[in-house]
Image (cartoon, rainbow, N blue to C red):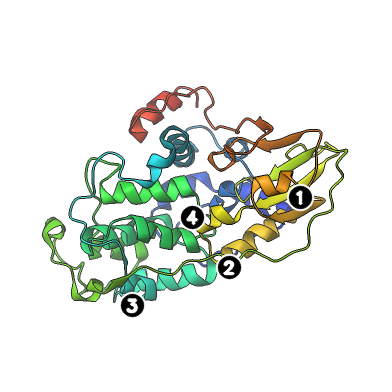
Amino acid sequence: MTPQLLTRYADILAAVERVDATAYARTRNYTDGAVSYLSPYISRGVISLPYVRERVLSRYSRQQAYTFIFELAWREYFQRQWYQLGDQLWSDIKAPQQGAVHHGVPDALQQGTTGITAIDTAIQQLYTTGYMHNHVRMYIASIACNIARAHWTQPARWLYYHLADHDLASNTLSWQWVAGTFSSKKYYCDQSNINKYCHIQQRGTFLDVPYEYLPDLAIPQILKAHSVPGLHTILPDIPAPQFRYDKPLLIYNACHLDPLWRADMDANRVLLLEPEHYRQYPVSPHVLSFILRLAENIPGIQLFCGSIEDLLRTGNFPQVYTRQHPTTLHYPGIKDQPEWLFPQVTAVPGSFMSYWKKCEKYL
């Protein structure tokens, strides 16, 4: 299935009501499984994890929804780790990546020419839709880091650039988990695993070997050529916003696009796109367009491309508000608390399962 990115708030809420928690539990690892396709709206802050959980629990028992909520908790765990780790998120966390020989991205992955049909098809779909099934993301990370021996940093940036649901914490820590720098061992996939979950019967690829041979596999010829992709974001050239300086300023960004946030407040509303952020973490034109269209759900919102300092130099606002997030830590003003799935759990252990055991009692 090729998902369609939704941009109307009503359509996004309707998608939440279509989640089939029991089918999700049975089939989520298959590329045609009953996944929710809600990740782009959660990562953009249009809807929150607690909202999704409560809507699902209004139709399913906790037992039926257990697997779905378990997977939601992974995203919260990654966000909590980002708060805790800060800039360490961008370095090998638990151990150096063993076996890495370069810091590029295999050209065959960038071009979708690995010869593994499910992988190549998924890469082309990524370029046209911004979507990639989570299981396929793991396959690609394993091929890049553990078969082609690339350090995870540039491949992670490449995937992040194209993902409509990109989330710096989820993407970065997932790559580190596969590469063995945020886990106890590396993740490998063989062709039989890809065949099973992608419903294909391909043979003869570089992954069509017994699973136990994969750690010692020589870099396949098709994966040897590599390069660092040129990833750039061109922000729109727009007129300066027209503000009322007798009213508060509410600041949104690409991770905070909730149409209901302080909706009753008479205030200036602005979507802030900071050039320095996009220099460090570029996104594709397709992704940027998606962000801008989601922002249209917020009545009266204006767009400002510049630093937070540039924004505040436009005039004196009586108050400045935003929502707390790792991307807003340098904003001044009042920060509303995040909407956590498990607000009771504030200490974040090093492993997800330890974290989940703390959360489970509050389910």
What type is the residue that disc 2 sits on? Pro
- Taking the spot 57% from the left edge, 62% from the top edge, the residue there is 287
Q: Are marks 1 and 2 in contact (CB under 8 Å)?
A: no
**Foreground of the two, 216 or 321:** 321
Q: Is residue 5 visible?
A: no
What type is the residue that disc 4 sits on? Gln
Side of 10 where 31 appears, left or right: left
User: What label does residue 285 carry, if any?
Assistant: 2
Residue identified by numbered label 4? 280
Which one is earlier in the sequence, the residue at label 3 or at label 1?
Answer: 3
Q: Secondary structure at mark 4?
A: helix
- Taking the spot 61% from the left edge, 62% from the top edge, the residue there is 288
Which one is earlier in the sequence, the residue at label 4 or at label 3?
Answer: 3
Q: Could you give the CA–CA distance between mark 3 and mark 1, rounded to whole angstroms?
A: 41 Å
Which one is earlier in the sequence, the residue at label 4 or at label 2?
Answer: 4
Residue identified by numbered label 3? 113
Q: Quadrant of residue 148?
A: bottom left
Q: Secondary structure at mark 2?
A: helix
Q: Could you give the CA–CA distance between mark 4 and mark 1, rounded to whole angstroms?
A: 27 Å
Side of 5 where 310 appears, left or right: right
Q: Residues within 10 Å of mark 1 (few under 14, many from 20)?
A: many
x, y percent for residue 330: 58, 38
Between marks 3 and 2 in the image, the one whose residue lies nearer the viewer? 2
Residue 336's place in the image compared with 11, above or below, is above
What type is the residue that disc 1 sits on? Ile
**Foreground of the two, 302 or 216:** 302
Residue identified by numbered label 1? 298
